[in-house]
Image: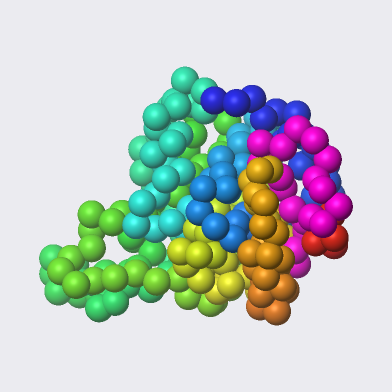
Amino acid sequence: MVNLNAEMAELWASLGAPAAGRARVIQFVSARRGEGTSTVARELAFFAARRAGRSVWLVDLDLLSSPQHAAIAEESERYGLLGQPAAASPDGSIFFAVNPPAKGPDGKPWPDARFLAAHRVGAARWWVTRFRREALRGRQAVHIIGEGDYWNGLRRFADLIIVDCPSADRSQAAMTVAPFMDQTVLVVAADEPDVRAPAFLRDSLVGAGADVAGLFFNRATVEPPPIVRGLMP
């Protein structure tokens, strides 16, 4: 695992201070899969919890794969052991819908929020979510919804909420939740030769109501080229 502490410290500083008394929700997304968005989101959560002393929630919007939970479990010596599953919604609200609606063993409606679990990571004050895909039945499917109740409710329980979105070529999740995020960071691989896709994504996110805070060049060790600097706000 590449040590990204220096990059995370720089990213943390560049995001600026949050509004007083208000938790910050930051979305990470890339135009294409393979840009390393999940790594950047996870490392910033790790940095904020361990180095900056913040209480952090890492919310994984890749519901059917839950790669963040899997990655942390695989690297428990680095991040810490995962705790037992707990409720991931403080008030029953949630950012997705399961269709057809779920029912419990007694035939009564089963709240969608019960499909999402949160696991504490090690001794630090951070949690990672995992969608309970195994609880889906038959033809049930899940999709992200454009409502802000979950994000507002979670603010009361964390200093920082990091939202890891699937890439835009796989999902519209980033557009759907954009209006409820305080900041959006676009992740671009350092060796990406074509900046048209990130530029289009930036414009689409802004149109959807996102505050695009900037670009993070993953695996970069040099200054970004001039053509890419032009994408920065």
Q: Quadrant of residue 42?
A: top right
Q: Is residue 222 above or below residue 100?
A: above
Number of numbered tags placed on the structure image: 0
Relative placement, left or right, of 43 versus 128 is right
Q: What is the x, y in percent for residue 16?
A: 84, 49
User: What's drawn in magenta, residue-wise?
Assistant: 211-228
Relative placement, left or right, of 124 versus 193 is left
Tell me the residue at 58%/31% (across/down).
Answer: 124
Return the residue nearer the eye: 4 or 33.
33
Magenta stretch contains residue 216:
yes
Q: What is the x, y in percent for residue 80?
A: 48, 26
Tell me the residue at 23%/54% (across/down).
Answer: 134
Q: Looking at the image, can residue 45 be seen?
A: no
Q: What is the x, y in percent for residue 222?
A: 80, 35
Q: Quadrant of residue 88?
A: bottom left
Q: Looking at the image, can residue 221 be seen?
A: yes
Tell me the residue at 45%/49% (across/down).
Answer: 129
Q: Quadrant of residue 107?
A: bottom left
Relative placement, left or right, of 125 versus 19 is left
The quarter of the picture where the N terminus appears is: top right
Return the residue nearer the eye: 217 or 130.
217
